Image (tube, coloured by chain):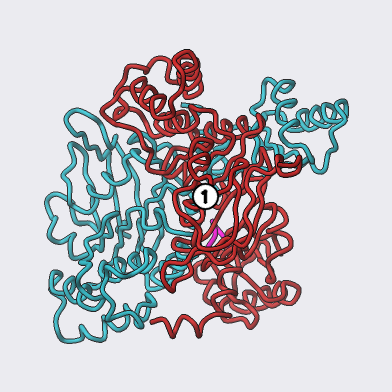
Amino acid sequence: MDFEEKEKAVVVKDLERRFGRFVAVNRVTFEVSRGEIFGFLGPNGAGKSTTIRMLCGILAPTGGTGRVAGFDILTQPEMIKAHIGYMSQKFSLYEDLTVEENIDFYGGIYRISREKKRERKEWVIEMAGLKERRHSKTAVLSGGWKQRLALGCAILHEPPVIFLDEPTSGVDPISRRQFWDLIYELSGGGVTIFVTTHYMDEAEYCDRLALIYRGELIASGTPEALKTKLMKEDVIEVLCERPQDAMGEVEKITGIKEVALFGKGLHAVAEDGETAVPAIHETLKEHGYQMERIEKIIPSLEDVFVSLIEARDKAEKPQKEVRR
Amino acid sequence: MIAAIQAEILAKSFNGLVAVDALTFKVDGGEIFGLVGPDGAGKTTTMRLLTSILEPTSGDAWVFGHHTVKEAEAIKEEIGYMSQRFGLYPDLTVMENIDFYADIYGVPRKGRGERIDRLLAFSNLTPFKRRLAGNLSGGMKQKLGLACALIHTPRVLFLDEPTNGVDPVSRRDFWRILYQLLREKVTIFVSTAYLDEAERCNRVGLIHKGKLLALGTPGDLKKLMEGTIVEVRTPEPRKATDLLREELKSDSVGLFGSRVHVVTLEPDKTMKKAEDILKRTGLKLMGLRLIEPSLEDVFISVLAKK
């Protein structure tokens, strides 16, 4: 393994997985650097889980190659399992065991030596803020605590690569922040984080993102690059009175593809922002709406993803019809 | 005008554990109201109290003037309710599921066909009407659940975390349908754990541990933020976070991807300080500005005050 490869935690080339005639993952290629936080996004059924299962050495690919933490996913799946941590939204904790018992259980699974085990256990308890609760049953812990405990158990063996599958679903915002602080800390220490999420604001916390759809990688880059370079349309913010009613008027304007209610205003997706701003202004004025502001804004990640996916859908409509 | 939904010191305990703690609020007709909070905050219990499924331990609630305990039957006619695990029959087709709900709600046979056709078209399910519900994708199941909840033309729609675990594209699709309903003057009461989704509601209630922390339009709530957010952009955000955390002890410093946020009571002073700190340590400053808080920032700020 040369130096460059050592700096790559995940390297995937033309990765493919077929189930019969169905191609779940279609020649996907990407790399994740050591210490990077990599967000893997896509709608349900797009091939996200299949990809992760291959990267974790649980499912063999039907084509292409991949290395995780320096090991080959085809020939060394067992080595991979020992060198990664995995945590899913359904935290795999035993509710009727105490905090300590859960940690001990995972220590056993990962075959951590006795001396090391004690040290790691204290680390997890400290990290999760569970000092006062080490003898509490896991069932009585709040979502945030459970989440941090599950993370601790998943990285008890100090893996260089961690997979987090929708880790923060439904936890309160303070716990979510604390969780991300931990992630940044781990990443700062050189641990590579591979994370999936449906929260687009959370996707913004990642260093780099990849979007998978219908088994194919359709976009990748930093959140900044995705927002500023990838969306063909412009997003316009409209602040006016009675936005709910105004929505109907704005939708009718040629060149406006979509309008959504957003806070006290509207977000309109336009083919061309330069012509759309005055057109919206005109239309609303004509219908007697008071306006506060109409301007082009930087799209949100959600805007970008929805636009990319819908563009792809449009291009592939005929295929969908046949499958029905 | 009579409120679409009204709650007065509404409370519910289970075996002495308080799930919903003295909620008081009003929702106007035609409004979309978001009840926002983490798992276990009391969202589902609140919804069950308002839909007459549960009886409160104390306090009262009304839906279009009907009392949720004394007039439960009248309420069932006024409302549509989509729970988190809405009862679709996987071995019935889309059409059969809707028909089944029409029977339950006693929707007259006459005119039922047109009503169903409209609901199918409106939820983009027409091409799938003969598909078994069990074979639908998550997003489509959600839309079918919604169509079933709307079969009797309710005036108020209750949606309990309808977009939980749903991807952004299906989520946006679902919201498009909700906007159409708003135009037909349906009142919508929706719960969610997604704070960005709350931005799409006319008014929002933040709920935590059974208590309403704040109530108002997303714009009103942003005024509750204690302090101002300074956004710092640099090519080395992590290093900058550590530095700023160390030096700006009185402020709270957080890393958000490529940006560093500093919450401060003295924005001018903090901006000056941040600039100095970065200059002194040789980190390049790419941007420094005040930004509007997100609802998540507000939620955290309000919680911290408690």
The residue positioned 50% from the left and 16% from the top of the image is: A116
Question: Please, is residue B32 above or below residue B284 in the view?
Answer: below
Q: Position of residue A299 (x, y in %)?
A: 66, 60
Q: Position of residue B194 (x, y in %)?
A: 46, 49
Chain assignment, label 1: A
Q: Chief secondary structure of the magenta span?
A: strand
Between residues B222 and A105, which one lies in front from this camera angle?
A105
The residue positioned 66% from the left and 41% from the top of the image is: A36
Taking the image as shown, residue B142 lies to the left or right of residue B11, namely: right
At label 1, the amino acid type is Thr
Colour red, chain: A
- Residue B171 visible to an observer of this rendering: yes
The residue positioned 73% from the left and 27% from the top of the image is: B244
Q: Residue furthest front?
A: A75
Colour cyan, chain: B
Q: Position of residue A280 (x, y in %)?
A: 66, 74
All told, the count of numbered labels is 1
> Please, what secondary structure does the residue beneath circle 1 have?
strand
Q: Position of residue B191 (x, y in %)?
A: 37, 51
Give the magenta part as a residue range: A261-265
- Residue A88, quarter of the rendered image: top left
- Residue B218 visible to an observer of this rendering: no
Between residues B297 and A11, which one lies in front from this camera angle?
A11
Instruction: Rate crowding at label 1 as few (under 14), some (14 to 19) or many (20 or more) other CA atoms within 10 Å.
Output: many
Taking the image as shown, residue A143 lies to the left or right of residue B16, namely: right
Is B52 inside the magenta-drawn segment?
no
Taking the image as shown, residue A288 lies to the left or right of residue B49, namely: right
- Residue A234, quarter of the rendered image: bottom right
Quickly name the residue at label 1: A196
